[in-house]
Amino acid sequence: MKDILGRPIKDLSRQEWWGIPRREIKWYPQIDYERCIGCGVCLITCGRTVYDWDFKNMKPIVARPYNCMIGCDTCAKMCPKDAILFPPLGYLRKIRDNAKVVLKARQKLLGIKKNINSLE
Ligand code: SF4
Ligand code: SF4
């Protein structure tokens, strides 16, 4: 299956993020349609096929919210009308801490270091 730009659509909603089911994390864009001018920048710049397009109203649709990368807000930054909303940074930090991301990342690197040292 492909999106309207011909890019393959993957379903990333069943993946886990640092041990948390993706669907339990409410990180995805929401569109303020009053502000949106239908430029299409969000659809085209998102590399995870989160968006589809409503050609009747010439507006984006958040079709696959759980494909959105946790922590990414590129489309919101690129939107010329600030019409894309994400949860506050505090929410992101809370799920980061709940998932023990800092500890796990550090442990992963230490594990790689151990493997490298054992080869030397
Ligand atoms: S980038 Fe912003 S203004 Fe443009 S279509 Fe998307 S939400 Fe609407
Ligand atoms: S935040 Fe990133 S991954 Fe999520 S919809 Fe926007 S561009 Fe796509």
Image: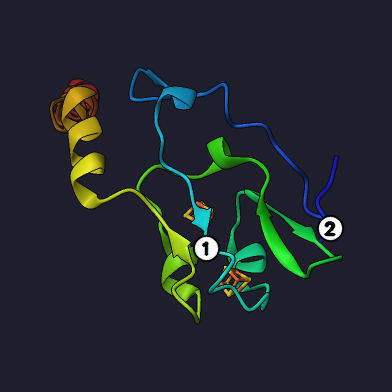
Q: Which residue is mark 1?
A: 32
In the rendered image of this protein, does residue 72 appear above or below residue 76?
Answer: above
SS assignment at label 1? loop
Residue in the image at 14% along x and 31% along y: 106
Ligand 1 falls in quadrant: bottom right
Graded by Cα atoms within 10 Å as few (under 14), some (14 to 19) or many (20 or more), the crowding at tag 1 reads few
Label 1 C-beta lies within 8 Å of the nearest ligand 1 atom? yes
In which quadrant of the rendered view does residue 116 lie?
A: top left
Q: Residue at x 62, y 73 (%)?
A: 41
Say what amino acid the circle numbered 1 marks. Asp
Left or right: where 68 falls relative to 73 = right
Relative to 34, say whether 25 is above or below.
above
Distance (Cα) linking label 1 and label 2: 22 Å
- Label annotation for residue 104: none
Disc with the residue nearer the chain's start (1 vs 2): 2
Residue name at image x 86 percent, y 65 percent: 56
Q: Residue at x 16, y 24 (%)?
A: 107
Q: Which residue is mark 2?
A: 4
Q: Position of residue 73 (x, y in %)?
A: 41, 58
**Spot occupied by residue 15 in the image (x, y as percentages of width and height):** 52, 23
Of 118 and 57, the residue lying toward us: 57
Q: Using the image as rendered, state which of residue 77 and residue 104 is in the foreground.
A: 77
Q: Amino acid under label 2? A: Ile
Disc 2, SS: loop
